[in-house]
Image (tube, rainbow, N blue to C red):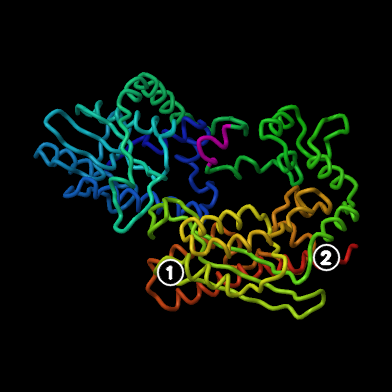
Amino acid sequence: MNTHLLSKSSFIRGIQCDKHLYLYKYHYDEMDEISEMQKAIFKRGIDVGKLAQQLFPGGIDLSPETHSDYEEPLVKTKEFLDNKQRIIYEAAFQAEEVLSVADILLNTDDGLKIYEVKSSTSVTDVYLIDAALQYWVITKAGYKVNDFSIIYINNQYVRKGELDLHQLFRIESVLDKIITKQSWIEKNINRLKNVLGQNEIPQIDISEHCYSPYICGFYNYCRRHIPENSVFDLSGVHLTDKYEFYRSGILSMEELTDEIHLPRSAKIQVDVFKNGKQLIDAEGIKNFLSGILYPVYFMDFETFQPAIPLFDNSKPYMQIPFQYSLHYLESKGAELQHFEFLADASDDPRIPFIENLLRDFKDIGDILVYNKSFEIKRLNEIAEAFPQYKLKIDNLISRIKDLIVPFQKKYYYTNDMKGSYSIKYVLPALVPELNYQNLPINEGGLASLTFESLFDENNPEVINEKRKNLLEYCKLDTFAMVKILEKLESIV
């Protein structure tokens, strides 16, 4: 059975933090639960990697049956290279107890050409470390590496007709950059082996390194001693400053004295926490409400961001609107009306989205959204892609007003908002009987992933259930705005 101490992923964990590596190897069950968002990011990476293989067709795929068993791929890689197999996907190498798996390998007369595929849109420092480790392993295993490139996504590519892989992907040689890192790689391999040879968990405190290059997989495990309402919950305070408080022995907001300089938002947050009273600036709220004229629409969009553009006139990671919810009040106290749209996961949703949206609006009425820059940007993108709708879209945009303002400016603040003006915190603080916690879909990222998953779903029952959950979530977003406006109006 193949055994190894380090791999690409565990090496990166170790570079981030010795404790992270040790916990990952020996206390895996303590790791934070992987979110649906993280799972989707992993799947996206796999899907992009498979698509990039088409740049080098005809290869042999040596992906293992299980994620941890690389015994057969190691043997097969050597056999195929000895037999002059030209292209191999997921070729496995091991040297000095370090495992490396190459996404795409070209076996040439001059040596191996290795291609590492990334679903991001640039070459980052951590990708260079990843590549440098692979180069170290492959050369230590006795092979000559003639070139090493990173394949990543060109976010300027606009799809027109069939997908053009040579336009979608960029290929950048990083050989010169990773050769200069080889002594550093070897030094850290030896160091991390020593870390794994210890008999106890390394004593490393939380710090800024917990976030770089990725959020640590044991983030919550290492923060079990952090209480609620800690300095890490402060709004508008830089992460470095929060850790300065922590290292100086200040952990709770209760310990922050008046002499400590804080941004206005954080100062309000601390004051409200300490005195237990909500902050209400009735004059500020009144001025805000004076700018809202009935009839009023409450509008919210949901979007998804496929890494690979699915439709003409779209780019990688472009936010594609697929759903909206509208609530409508003709006047204060009038009967609340609701309109909604959810596209089918088949063709480009943008045209049916905008045509239905325009149809559901009357010619007059303010349009309330929560964080208007998001909706306005999406509407402008549709107008750019489909200019026949531009005049009507411009008219809609001119009517949009932002319900986030009184919370962003702290006209209304309670401790239950936890320093945030996100609607996910504002709603339960103002209207406790309403919240997102019990919804199957309870945040926008999950809504995006749910819709994207429908493109590969064939079970009608699953499709219907997911669509029901999407409609329920988006509807709550605009109903929440209705109730929040009611609460603000009741104050003045």
What secondary structure is marked by label 1?
A: loop
User: Mark 2 is on which residue type?
Assistant: Lys
Question: Residue at image x 87%, y 58%?
Answer: 286
Question: Residue at image x 29%, y 49%?
Answer: 165
| Residue 487 disc label | 2
Q: Residue furthest bottom?
A: 335
Which residue is at the front of the view, 43 or 406?
406
Q: Which residues are magenta?
A: 209-216
Residue 87 place in picture, x, y as percent: 17, 43
Q: Quadrant of the N terminus?
A: top left
Mark 1 nearby-residue class (10 Å; few <14, some 14–19, many ≥20): some
What secondary structure is marked by label 2?
A: helix
Q: Residue furthest left?
A: 83
Which residue is at the front of the view, 161 or 242?
161
Question: Residue at image x 87%, y 66%?
Answer: 490
Give the quadrant of residue 287.
bottom right
Between the C-alphas of marks 2 and 1, the distance is: 37 Å
Give the quadrant of residue 142.
top left
Q: Quadrant of the C terminus?
A: bottom right
Residue 372 place in picture, x, y as percent: 66, 55
